[in-house]
Structure formats: structure tokens, C-alpha cells
Image: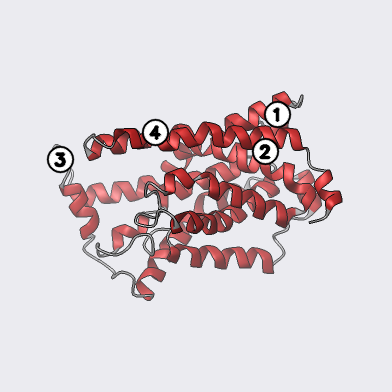
Amino acid sequence: MDSKRISQLDSKPLFIFLSLSFLIAWPLFLAPMAFTDRDLQTQQIIKTIFYALAMWAPGIAAIVATKVSGRSLADLNLKRLGSKRYYIWAWLLFPILSLLTGVVTVLFGIAEFDPAFSMAKEALASLPNTSPLTPTMILVIQIFASLSIAPPLNMLFALGEELGWRGFLLPKLLPLGQWKAILISNVIWGLWHAPAIIQGYNYPGYPVAGIFMMIILTLLLGTILSWLYLNTNSPWAPALAHGSINAVASLPLIFLVPGFDMAIGGTLVSVMGWIPLAIFVLWLSATKHVPVNAEVHIKG
């Protein structure tokens, strides 16, 4: 790696940011392990709370690192939106890629198409029967919510990560070049998830291999999120996309017969999900959308 480019990195805020991102998040990721004696529903609630808090660790780290280094919080571009058309990409791209993941899962024989939606109906049937709505009606409402209100709601939590990884870390690494900055920042993002992965997050049954699987995922997802950031100079566009990912990643499961390995197929984060993600990343590269033109990045 070019030593001159490395010397251009502002090492102090980078060290503070990376240290705080891990030191705050990892205890929160590991905390649910202290509650394994509770019932499954309680464990899930506890895990959701701690993981939601952990998502804001990079954002807090970015704010602290910016202030300690004597810079203005305006450098994080929270008051900036940038080009509006990229918010359409942020909202709609991942529902499309998620549904394509379901198609790929069926085509590769990982799971079978289920027109009866039995997995979702079984899950709904296990809930207390206090609603006048039928399981099918609830299912339609959930799908509509995941495509409409869920992405902006999820964005409030996802902003913590995007403020850190894309709003702070990516720009700080740009002296290395866009591709190197994108790749390095997203490998770090993947490793940051390690304590959650060993507990079965995203890749149940793969506590060690899952860490490497997560890094592949973050390299693919992170390239797309970085593309959105570099075209808007705003953490809000990747935050909306991140919120959309969290809302729709499991959407294909509704249409698949249960019983398959969900680390391999079915969801956008699974191995089968890497295929549509990789195709889109290759399209970004082949069409020269990445690296982003310097004038676009500056003017946004």
C-alpha cells in the first residue's frame, strides 16, 4: 500500500473511532449471553434491545472522534441530504434484490416455492388469537409495512451504524483511494459483528465460518451503501438503505417451504443472497458508477 497515502490518514480520530466502536458495541453484543436461562421470547426481546443499542456505537464513536479531534459535527453531514434520486435507490433496491434471492434459492434447489405461505401462517397461528384479522390479512399487512413504513422507521437505528461506517470511517480512508477505502471499511464493519455472529446472528449453526460469511456480506452490502454515500455526501441515504435491508431481508421466507438452512438460502444475508448483491456490485463497477466521479463526490 502506498506509504504516502497512508501518511495522509488522520490517525488520531481513526484510532478513537475504531476503539470506541468496538469497546461500546462488543459488550452490548455479548450481554444477551447472560440471560440464556430465560424463556426464548424473553431472550429475543433482550437481544433485540442490546443489539439496537449496539447499532449506535459507531455513531457515538464518530461524534466523539470528531469532537476530540477539534472538528465540527457539521463534518458528519447530518444536515445534508444530497441528490434525492439516490433515496429512491435506497428505498427500492433491496426489496428487489431480496425477492431475487428467493428466486435464486428456489433455482439452486435450496428450498421449494410455497404458494400456501405455510411458514408465515404457522408463525402467525402460534400467536395469541386476539385479532379479528385472518392470517392471510395479517400477512398482507406485514408485507406492505415492510415495503412502506418499516424502512424509514428502521433508519433511526441504522443511522447509528451509517453515521460511523459511511459518514466517518469511509471519508477518513478516502486518501487511500475509493476502492481501498470501501473494502477496508467494510471488512472492519464485518468483523465488528463477530460477537453477534458467534451467537447465531444471520448464520445460525456457523459460529466461526459465519464471521467470514458476514465479511463477504458486508463487502457486498457496504459497496452499495458506500456508493449511495459518495453520491450524496450524506449518511441519510445509506441509513435509509440499511433500514430497507433490515425490513425486507427475510421477505422471501414467506414464499418458501420451511426446513432449509437459512444461512445458505432464503434471506438477503444468506449465501444465495450474495448472488444478486454481487451482480449489482459488478454492474456498479462495470458501468463506472464506482469509483464515484470526484466532482460528484465533492458537489453531491
- Could you give the CA–CA distance between mark 3 and mark 2, rounded to whole angstroms? 48 Å
Q: Residue beneath label 3, please?
A: 132
Residue 129 pos. (x, y %): 13, 40
Q: Spot the residue most to the left.
A: 129
Secondary structure beneath label 4: helix
Mark 3 or mark 4, whichever is nearer to me: 4
Mark 3 or mark 2, whichever is nearer to me: 2
User: What amino acid does circle 2 point to?
Assistant: Phe
Secondary structure beneath label 1: helix
User: What amino acid does circle 4 point to?
Assistant: Ala
Mark earlier in primary sequence (1, 3): 1
Residue 226 pos. (x, y %): 64, 50
Contact between marks 2 and 1 (CB within 8 A): the answer is yes
Secondary structure beneath label 2: helix
Res. 119 image quadrant = bottom left
Left or right relative to 61: residue 176: right
Q: Which mark is residue 31?
A: 4
User: What amino acid does circle 3 point to?
Assistant: Pro
Contact between marks 4 and 2 (CB within 8 A): the answer is no
Q: How many marks?
A: 4
Residue 4 pos. (x, y %): 86, 50
**Residue 161 or residue 7, whichever sits in front:** 7
- Could you give the CA–CA distance between mark 4 and mark 2, rounded to whole angstroms? 26 Å
Q: Residue beneath label 2, please?
A: 168
Q: Which mark is residue 66?
A: 1
Mark earlier in primary sequence (2, 1): 1
